Image (cartoon, rainbow, N blue to C red):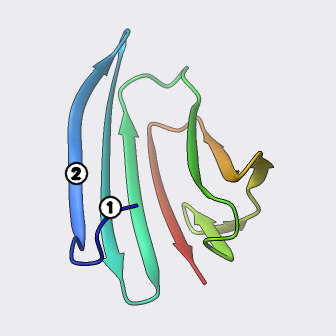
């Protein structure tokens, strides 16, 4: 969990195998927006948040329902760029 005072941040150009991934987040009035980009289009990435922390998940403008895995909720991302908005 990030401190409440931290309203935005990013990790950019992280090399993982033959892929390169960047993740940024920005605190919005109605939730948190994450942007995930990757160079490869044949990789699937998992995005997780603690179970029950957010009621609404939006991926690239579409409302989605995450899958529950243990005490986490997750979605799978296969696009080169994904915008995720999680809110209550």
Relative placement, left or right, of 23 versus 9 is: right
Residue 83 image label:
none
Give the answer, above or below, for where 23 lies relative to 20.
below
Q: Give the camera-side residue of 27 and 78.
A: 27
Which residue in the protein does label 1 denote? 25
- The number of discs equals 2
Q: What residue do we see at 21% from left, 31% from top? A: 13
Callout 1: SS? strand
Relative placement, left or right, of 31 versus 49 is: left
Give the answer, above or below, for where 32 lies relative to 28.
above
Query: What's the distance in space between the residues labelled 1 and 2, CA to CA?
Result: 6 Å
Q: Quadrant of the N terminus?
A: bottom left
The 10 Å Cα crowd at callout 2, few under 14, some 14 to 19, many 20 or more, is few
Q: Give the camera-side residue of 80 and 16.
A: 16
Q: Position of residue 76 (x, y in %)?
A: 65, 41
Residue 10 image label:
2
Q: What residue do we see at 59% from left, 28% from top? A: 44
Q: What residue do we see at 37% from left, 41% from top? A: 37
The 10 Å Cα crowd at callout 1, few under 14, some 14 to 19, many 20 or more, is some
Q: Position of residue 77 (x, y in %)?
A: 58, 40
Give the answer, above or below, for where 15 lies relative to 76.
above
Q: Are marks 1 and 2 in contact (CB under 8 Å)?
A: yes
Relative placement, left or right, of 59 versus 37 is: right
Give the answer, above or below, for where 2 lies relative to 10.
below
Q: What residue do we see at 40% from left, 46% from top? A: 36
Q: Quadrant of the C terminus?
A: bottom right
Q: Position of residue 22 (x, y in %)?
A: 30, 39
Callout 2: SS? strand
Precedes in sequence: disc 1 or disc 2: 2
- The residue most toward the top is 17
Q: Position of residue 34 (x, y in %)?
A: 40, 59
């Amino acid at each position: 969990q990030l401190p409440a005072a931290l309203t935005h941040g990013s990790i950019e150009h992280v090399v993982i195998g033959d892929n390169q991934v960047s993740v940024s987040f920005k605190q919005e009035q109605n939730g948190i927006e994450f942007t995930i980009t990757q160079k490869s289009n044949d990789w699937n990435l998992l995005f997780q948040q603690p179970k029950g922390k957010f009621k609404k998940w939006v991926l690239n403008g579409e409302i989605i329902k995450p899958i529950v895995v243990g005490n986490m909720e997750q979605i799978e991302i296969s696009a080169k760029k994904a915008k995720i908005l999680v809110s209550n």
